[in-house]
Image: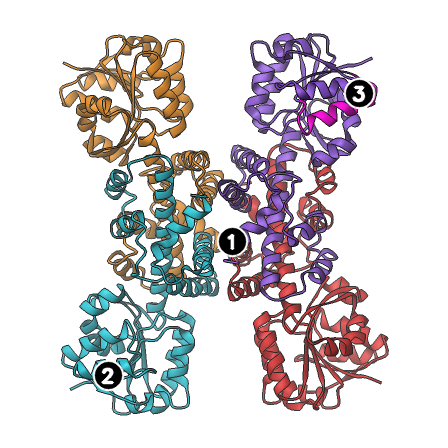
Chain colours: A purple, B red, C cyan, D orange
Amino acid sequence: MTTVAFIGLGIMGGPMAANLVKAGFEVVGHNRSPDPVRRLEAAGGRGAASVAEAVADADVVVTMLPDSPDVEAVALGDDGVYAGARSGTLHVDMSTIDPEVARRLAAAGRERGLRVVDAPVSGGEPGAREGTLSVMVGGDAADVADAWPVLEAVGGTVVHVGPAGAGQTVKAANQLIVGGTLELVAEALIFLEASGVDTGAAVEVLAGGLAGSTVLQRKAPAMLARDFTPGFRVELHHKDMGIVTAAAREAGVVIPLGAVVAQLLASLQAQGDGGLDHGALLKLVERLSGR
Amino acid sequence: MTTVAFIGLGIMGGPMAANLVKAGFEVVGHNRSPDPVRRLEAAGGRGAASVAEAVADADVVVTMLPDSPDVEAVALGDDGVYAGARSGTLHVDMSTIDPEVARRLAAAGRERGLRVVDAPVSGGEPGAREGTLSVMVGGDAADVADAWPVLEAVGGTVVHVGPAGAGQTVKAANQLIVGGTLELVAEALIFLEASGVDTGAAVEVLAGGLAGSTVLQRKAPAMLARDFTPGFRVELHHKDMGIVTAAAREAGVVIPLGAVVAQLLASLQAQGDGGLDHGALLKLVERLSGR
Amino acid sequence: MTTVAFIGLGIMGGPMAANLVKAGFEVVGHNRSPDPVRRLEAAGGRGAASVAEAVADADVVVTMLPDSPDVEAVALGDDGVYAGARSGTLHVDMSTIDPEVARRLAAAGRERGLRVVDAPVSGGEPGAREGTLSVMVGGDAADVADAWPVLEAVGGTVVHVGPAGAGQTVKAANQLIVGGTLELVAEALIFLEASGVDTGAAVEVLAGGLAGSTVLQRKAPAMLARDFTPGFRVELHHKDMGIVTAAAREAGVVIPLGAVVAQLLASLQAQGDGGLDHGALLKLVERLSGR
Amino acid sequence: MTTVAFIGLGIMGGPMAANLVKAGFEVVGHNRSPDPVRRLEAAGGRGAASVAEAVADADVVVTMLPDSPDVEAVALGDDGVYAGARSGTLHVDMSTIDPEVARRLAAAGRERGLRVVDAPVSGGEPGAREGTLSVMVGGDAADVADAWPVLEAVGGTVVHVGPAGAGQTVKAANQLIVGGTLELVAEALIFLEASGVDTGAAVEVLAGGLAGSTVLQRKAPAMLARDFTPGFRVELHHKDMGIVTAAAREAGVVIPLGAVVAQLLASLQAQGDGGLDHGALLKLVERLSGR
């Protein structure tokens, strides 16, 4: 039976770890605060008091943490994953971090005899609970194959997109497109409202043509109703746009729209709307337009 | 039997007029150059040597012309539609023009005893041939109802979105979203290529989540293959972004992304790529990134 | 003695006409509202009840009006300048309008036997009062030479920059640079404030190097003090950015920064700050940054 | 007699160190490659084979290095400045680096008993040779006072702008304004050329009004002549815009123009123009406009 150490049992990590239990893995979970560990134990997993304890006997170590420095600390720290895991252990980082950091981790893991796969997800808390996340996987083919059962237990769509870091690159591209599309839809909706158009009918006809998108279908109704209950929070998307702009810069790719979207999400965050759903870009366009 | 005068038998107007013939309307067509008139006659319509001749006995006048000044000239000119049409005639302008011009035409028509509906379309030449265009209709409810049989003969989806000008407003919103989404996808694809990602796999996983869009599904493969056969030409989208920015300005709505997209399409046009499909935004991002 | 008809005696035109009186010209002034005409009479000029009356005996007709349509109406209207002025009369339009409209007016004037020069100004109300305006002059060399004494009577710096329309083009370039520099300085100042820097000292050192500008010298202190008394109003700069973006588009020139600046001024205008000095871009950056 | 260790004797550091010798300081210089050390010796300084050797007996340590990681390595490395300098030594970092890194260095230095001042410069190689650099100084007042004689020996204008990091913040603001102004001038000049204006006359009149700037005066003539001999290289300004966007993000300040300027400089860099003067933004606008 495969033993999975799961580090980071938050809003996303908690239900993902629970799904691994359901799928028959032996799951040893660790979290900085203790409550999520209790919840994992209630769900049939085992709690660990430290990263070192969690990874000691693991075949696979999954990390699901907020940002690049968190993952680096947990992986590379003195009592961290790479110090404590057995040789050959598979580290599957499912956090959303900078692709460059993911590549560095892969190299550092290899030096310690570990195998590292980056596998960030999209689909939010509902996807985490229902096990329907989209998972973008970067790493060596053999390592990705070994990680597959774990990934399938938490994801609905799992796609291997390239070598180490490629998963994070695709996640960054995802956040670029999603943020930009939300802003385009926000600009369009405020323009339609300001022009006295029947927005419901307009969204219907827009959704049916080349302007159609998952954002328009799933998010436009809530945006029109000014319901900004997350969903995916502005503060996280703001963090992710930092990754997008840094990674594009690193790759020498010019992203004029992406750069403007990053500023707009930074503005929402600065204005105290970091806790709202990222569809709140509509509020920003509304304010900019004095409405 | 309803007689429809059809002014403007170009790439879009030609097949639309033919579809009206097929649907049982008596169609009298006029075009500045004579060949398209011959083709309409071959398809079962009747040719007219002038706008005045075409509209003299019409119940409905459809115009399908390149830009605002063309429609104004044909509608308001000395020998134009409003001078020659019978009182009560329904003018259905299916061109893509400035919403403000559409509202002015509606007022001018009303003064002359005509009824005016704006009904721009999306779906391109294939949609025009197959009668599957999306039609965004603005105007008084009764006038729109009277225009309905004509609109359904050329369109697959016909939606009444508001008063006079509303059709054009929704079309402008459509072009804003489409242009912006194409640019976002272009930025994402070049970023993915530059980072050594398997772009086919990446597009698959992106399309399945919140980043999914009709643009990603229908256009990304051709963009990745550098196939920029139109489709919808850059020069037309450039023209349309002029309408978008002017209409948003008129409505007092701030569209930072839309404004940048307008500049990028203007750049493609200025660089001699006006005849390519608007997916050529990928080429622009590629050049900007020195690739 | 040269007779100058002066149409448009507003905040700018009033003091300019008075300066022409002082310089020894016979000035016949007209304005839509009567009070400014009274003031011109008190300053030694003559009032006229209509454009036609004002231009009937004029050697030179100066127009100083808010926007392109105003100038077109006064120049081309049934009782307008070109209908009423004697053959050979020199029309000097000092309004800020679209270069394309200026070129059309020059052509229309020529057809009527008039000579047309475009001569927009910068320097604001103080410059108008003190006769120190910068004047950017477009037109045929001979016509510009004939206009020179009039231009020197109202301006401190008068420069002939090219053929008809060129004056307006340079004015548009001026507004592009001024608007953009104000926004750059606004972004820099808020960034400095947010970072706990001594802004006074910072402005001193910035002004002394390559970052130095007239905006930084003349406007930064008032901006830091949140004193937005105009000066030059946001609503006028917003109007002018409409000219800038249209003229650049017409010329096939891509102006990414200009396009964003136009959106930011549109936002200030939409938020009800149209009456403030354009240095209020600082307020916008402040709001965007949640400060 | 004050002993100054000078680490980094490149294009900027070399002449700065020579000016310190001229001003009567005892200068011990170190550089990764040996030739610049030979030049310093020829100018009357002393060479050191390592950082440790250079700083061992120094009262003041000046660093003049390319980027944040270089300064961190030299300051914090095992054989670095903070390991080897005597307690109480003053570290004056004159490199252009991230303000956040400058603040971290100040804290790290304090822990080791050192005093740290950040003092980045503007004015380029000519300013370095002639000792006329502008110096923006951040740090505690007493430390800045102690550093003053050194700073005055290399700079023409020296301004204390706030606490640790403030010098770097002001330098970042400087680069934001300079980059943006160059781009605005580039957009304006190409617009003027494309419109058939006499650009020389136009620059004259623009420079005399609110559009006037040091960039317009010093750089526009070379830009119009397509002379992009550096001056200040695109690759350095590209690096600096990375600092600007990161620092503004860190400070929660939204800089829409700055973000677009960063993309445009990134584009020049990606297109292989990194070695040209930053006035080459004109080339980019020219290409974008198909000219």
Distance from disc 2 to disc 3, alpha carbons, whole Å, reads 90 Å
Q: Residue at x 62, y 48 (%)?
A: A182
| Any part of residue A62 in sight | no
**Residue A21 — which label?**
3
Q: Are marks 2 and 3 in contact (CB under 8 Å)?
A: no
In the rendered image, the vertical position of residue B268 relative to residue A264, given as above or below: below
**Residue B217 — which label?**
none
**Residue C38 — which label?**
2
In the rendered image, the vertical position of residue A200 relative to residue A181, given as above or below: below
Residue at mark 3 shares a chain with residue at mark 1: yes
Q: Is A180 one of the magenta-colored residues?
A: no
What's drawn in magenta, residue-wise? A9-26
Residue at mark 2 shares a chain with residue at mark 3: no
Q: Residue at x 85, y 85 (%)?
A: B1
Residue D212 x/y as whole percent? 27, 54
In the rendered image, the vertical position of residue C235 relative to residue B113, given as above or below: above
Count of marks placed on residues: 3
| Any part of residue D146 in sight | yes
Q: Nearer the viewer, residue A125 or A227?
A: A227
Q: Residue at x 32, y 8 (%)?
A: D84
Horizontal side of residue B94 vs A132, given as left or right: left
Q: In what element is the residue under mark 2?
A: helix
Residue D276 x/y as whole percent? 38, 40
Local crowd size for mark 3, using a 10 Å CA cut-off: few (<14), some (14–19), many (≥20): many
Q: Which residue is mark 1?
A: A287
Local crowd size for mark 2, using a 10 Å CA cut-off: few (<14), some (14–19), many (≥20): some
Horizontal side of residue D82 vs B182, given as left or right: left
Q: Please, which chain is the residue tagged with disc 2 on?
A: C
First of labels 3, 1 by sequence position: 3
Distance from disc 2 to disc 1, alpha carbons, whole Å, reads 43 Å
Disc 1 residue type?
A: Arg
Disc 3 residue type?
A: Val
